[in-house]
Structure formats: structure tokens, C-alpha cells
Image (spheres, helix red, strand yellow):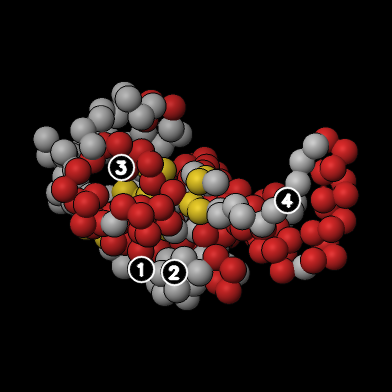
């Protein structure tokens, strides 16, 4: 199964791992699945689209496929914690110092910027748990850090993180004027890929984003 969502990949991978490594649990689940003519055999692999790029396609081939390099664009990459942890199960990248998403950004022709809170959570899980104040603090801290890094754009591999940065940025800017004065546009990782493949902002639905600051790409 290939998923475009960090949270989906995380949930599916953890459950897959537990069922494969717990015969008693597997037996219990299969007894339930038997009622609908299904069986968990433990042969499925769960991978995020970035893992497919990393393991099956490779960044060298991806570079050759790029039609419109995102030259000169400074991008703050946010891989998202659900893609990185638990590392003993996901085994995708270093959860403390992730590198692959920056390499992905670089393969598309853009320049990844470094910032201190790269591996930190965006705070969306806190909002889902009911603590919106803590969630806003998390996204505010990351946004200001990204801003100080000189980023012209934020890109994330996770749809939930995308929404947190795009919509949450407007909420955080009410309390922190520096975010209102200099907002940073946000692109989901696949949108960034589409632009590098020659698609237009109209094609990716950029008009539906909350932060609509023009992004200049040399074509």
C-alpha cells in the first residue's frame, strides 16, 4: 500500500507490524475477518510516497524527470513526525536530524534551508487532542524559526501538517504580528513535485490555499 499521508502511513505501518509480530493478535483479528471472507496474511508492505521515491525510483532519476527546476526558491522542509517515529518500525529517516526531505527538495531544483525546529511537531496532534493553545504555540515557534531562516516557502510531506501551517498561520498571526507582516506560503510535497514537473499553480489548486502569497518560479 502506498499512501500520501503521514498519519495514514504511521497507523497502517504500526498495525501491520503488530499483527506480523503477535501471532495471538493476528489469530484474533483473522477470526473477525473470517466473517467477511478476509484474512490478514502478513504479506503487505506499507510505504509513504517518499519511501517509494527513495527506495524504488531514486533521487537521481527524479532529477532527470524534472521539467521546471525550482531554481532560486528557498524552501523550509517539514517531513512531519509521523513519518519519522517510531523509527524502529518506520525506518525512514533520522527522527532527530532528518535529511531525506531536504534532499527531495534539492532534487526538484530548490534550495532547502536549515532551521532548528525541523524535527519538531507542528502541533496538529495537540489540536486534535483539544489543546488548541499548545497547538498554536507549536506552529508559531516553527513558523518564526522558518521565517528567520530566510525561507520563501514551506513544504511538508503531510496533509495534516500542511493544513496546520496554512490555516494555523493565519490564526498565529493574530497574536504574532511578524507572521502577519511576512506570511510564508505552504505547498504540500506532491504540489511541489507537480510544479517541478511543469504543472501550473492553477493545476495544483493554489487558489484554494489560505496563504496565497505569489511564489516566483523561473520558467
Alpha carbons under labels 1 and 4: distance apart: 34 Å
Mark number displayed over residue 193: 3
The answer to which of marks 2 and 3 sits earlier in the sequence is 2
Looking at marks 4 and 3 on the same chain, the residue that comes earlier in the sequence is marked by 4
How many C-alpha atoms fall within 10 Å of the one at disc 3: few (<14), some, or many (≥20)?
many
**Real-space CA distance between mark 1 and mark 3, rounded to the nearest whole angstrom:** 17 Å
Of residues 102 and 73, the one drawn nearer to the viewer in this rendering: 102
The image's mark for residue 40 is: 4
Question: What is the C-alpha distance between the residues marked 2 and 1?
Answer: 7 Å
Tell which circle, 1 or 3, labels the residue nearer the N-terminal end: 1
Q: How far apart are marks 2 and 4 (CA)?
A: 28 Å
Badge 2: residue crowd in 10 Å (few <14, some 14–19, many ≥20):
some
Which residue corresponds to the image point at 35% horizontal and 68% vertical from the top-left? Answer: 99
Towards the viewer: 57 or 141? 57
In front of the other: 100 or 184: 100
The nearer-to-camera label among 2 and 1 is: 2
Mark 2 and mark 4 residues within 8 Å of each other at the beta carbon: no
Amino acid at each position: 500500500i502506498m499512501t500520501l499521508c503521514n498519519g495514514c502511513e504511521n497507523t497502517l505501518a504500526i498495525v501491520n507490524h503488530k499483527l506480523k509480530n503477535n501471532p495471538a493478535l493476528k489469530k484474533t483479528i483473522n477470526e473477525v475477518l473470517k466473517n467477511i471472507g478476509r484474512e490478514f496474511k502478513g504479506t503487505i508492505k506499507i510505504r509513504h510516497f517518499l519511501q517509494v521515491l527513495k527506495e524504488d525510483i531514486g533521487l537521481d532519476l527524479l532529477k532527470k524527470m524534472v521539467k521546471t527546476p525550482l531554481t532560486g526558491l528557498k524552501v523550509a522542509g517539514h517531513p512531519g513526525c509521523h513519518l519519522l517515529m517510531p523509527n524502529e518500525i518506520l525506518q525512514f529517516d533520522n527522527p532527530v536530524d532528518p535529511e531525506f526531505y531536504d534532499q527531495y527538495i534539492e532534487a526538484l531544483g530548490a534550495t532547502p534551508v536549515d532551521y532548528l525546529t525541523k524535527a519538531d511537531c507542528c502541533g496538529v496532534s495537540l489540536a486534535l487532542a483539544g489543546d488548541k493553545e499548545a497547538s498554536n504555540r507549536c506552529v508559531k515557534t516553527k513558523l518564526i524559526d522558518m521565517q528567520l531562516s530566510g525561507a520563501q516557502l514551506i513544504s511538508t510531506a503531510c496533509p495534516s501538517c500542511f493544513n496546520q501551517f496554512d490555516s494555523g498561520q493565519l490564526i498565529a498571526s493574530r497574536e504574532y504580528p511578524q507572521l502577519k507582516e511576512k506570511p510564508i506560503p505552504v505547498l504540500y510535497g506532491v504540489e511541489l513535485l507537480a510544479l517541478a514537473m511543469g504543472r501550473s499553480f492553477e493545476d495544483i489548486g493554489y487558489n484554494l490555499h489560505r496563504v496565497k502569497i505569489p511564489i516566483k518560479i523561473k520558467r
